Image (cartoon, rainbow, N blue to C red):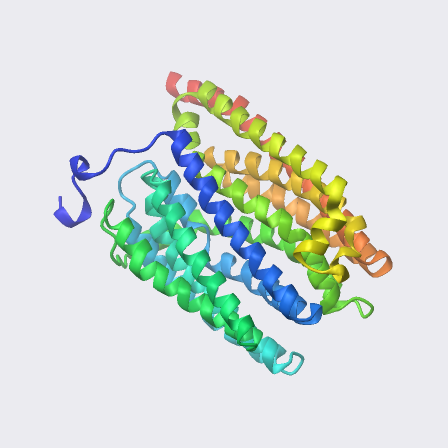
Amino acid sequence: MKLENHINAEQLPRQAGLSVNTAWAMLGNIFYAGGRFLIFVILAKHFTSGQVGRVDFVLAVVTPISFLFNMELRSVFVTHTKDFLRAGHCLATRIISNGVFAVFLLGFLLVIQNRWQGEKCLLLILAGLIRMAESWADVYLGVLQKHEKMNCWSISQMIKTSGVLIWAVLICWADESIAWILGGWLVVTILGVWFYDRVQARKFESVHLRFDWKMSFWLVRKGFPLGIFVTLAILNQQVAKYFIASAPELGDSAVAYFGVMMNFVFGAVAVQNGVNQAVLPRLARYFARERSEFIQLLKRVLGWSWLVMLVMLTVVWWRGDFILKVFYSEEYARQASLFNLVILAGCVVLTGMILGDAIVACQKFKSRMTAVALGLLVNVILCWQYVGQYGLKGAVWAAVVSSLVTTLSCAVVLIKALLAEPQAEIAQNSK
């Protein structure tokens, strides 16, 4: 056995408890979500709603495409319980997939360059580069997650988010173009990956490029269904913006109105994702060894999340218009009548996320993808039918109904997995 492939287990720090890891994951994701939220607050305070809408729309276009090509390799790596997969295999596969993503993005630019303004094309390029840098970080963060070192994972989020926020404030103070903010975002991400994520991950596992076509093919075969799932999930969050932007009476400003309200949901989603990622390795082990522990842990996560959701709904119902006015402006506060529905959709989305990640722990990747695809289909149909007629209200109701469909589908799949797997195992062992 090569020394470079393994690090002596005695040299590794002891793993933290689940509660500690969950707390660190929540802290890091609160910081991350809060930072992304504050970036749009800064943009809304300094730039017009049309400019904010263009940035939001570009991110809505680039993000699902990048996840499709990058796949969800981190989930495959974290939930892999055997010993032949190395982080270096994921890193090499990620570099290859990012090359394909870059080619696709350039082709997309050639197609739409005559219909988009020069600034919008520049924003698209910068957003694509940011997603590539974040995908490299994802490999190193996956090592930290697998070793349950969520404190390092959380500190990484804090460092990079703080850097982007400071840069955004400086650019607005200097009254520069909005593209400078994305440029600084890219530089901060690259520096964080190289000087922190890479260094911390190597304390727990040797991470260097391992170009192995058989392993890359195996990773693609395992990760591409998850990549499709994540792409569908993000499209489900963003699809309304495509219909809003294309409606003649709505446009970029309406995208900004919808986006700033959904940012509250995305912030909650980021925090919930941190909790889910912290418990995901343990859920996978419990599902394989002790189903009762799996169910108990899932109940705990659902219970705490539902409590937070109830608080969110109460606060927005009470002072939703005031919240939008303080964080953004009077222009955005005029849309407060839809704010309650947006948060309601968010609560359903959070429940679906928890059940969906539990499905991932059960290795039911394709079933989760089917559930999300069904929700996306409902969302597209409802947006196509009602956004043009009812505007933002139609888009919000489409989000509520589609998230409900996805959540119910995930619940059915999870119940089926919990009931069917033990019987299948008993039958196999009796042969």
Q: Quadrant of the N terminus?
A: top left
Residue 150 to residue 177: above or below: above
Residue 346 to residue 18: above or below: below
Q: Residue at x 61, y 81 (%)?
A: 113
Residue 118 to residue 252: above or below: below
**Residue 305 figure quarter:** top right
Front-lying residue, 202 or 43? 43
Q: Could you tell me residue 378's position as x and y percent?
A: 73, 48
Front-lying residue, 152 or 298? 152
Relative horizontal placement of residue 100, taking residue 342 as reference (left or right): left
**Residue 240 figure quarter:** bottom right
Q: Residue at x 65, y 78 (%)?
A: 116
Residue 242, can we see it?
Answer: no
Relative horizontal placement of residue 111, taking residue 149 as reference (left or right): right
Q: Residue at x 59, y 53 (%)?
A: 234
**Residue 211 figure quarter:** bottom left
Residue 316 to residue 303: above or below: below
Q: Could you tell me residue 281's position as x and y percent?
A: 40, 35
Front-lying residue, 421 or 158? 158
Q: Quadrant of the C terminus?
A: top left
Front-lying residue, 208 or 250? 250
* Furthest-top residue in this view: 430
Q: Residue at x 30, y 53 (%)?
A: 89
Relative horizontal placement of residue 124, taking residue 284 as reference (left or right): right
Q: Could you tell me residue 369's position as x and y percent?
A: 57, 44
Residue 355, can we see it?
Answer: yes
How many numbered marks have been drawn onto this rendered protein structure? 0
Q: Could you tell me residue 313's position as x and y percent?
A: 70, 38
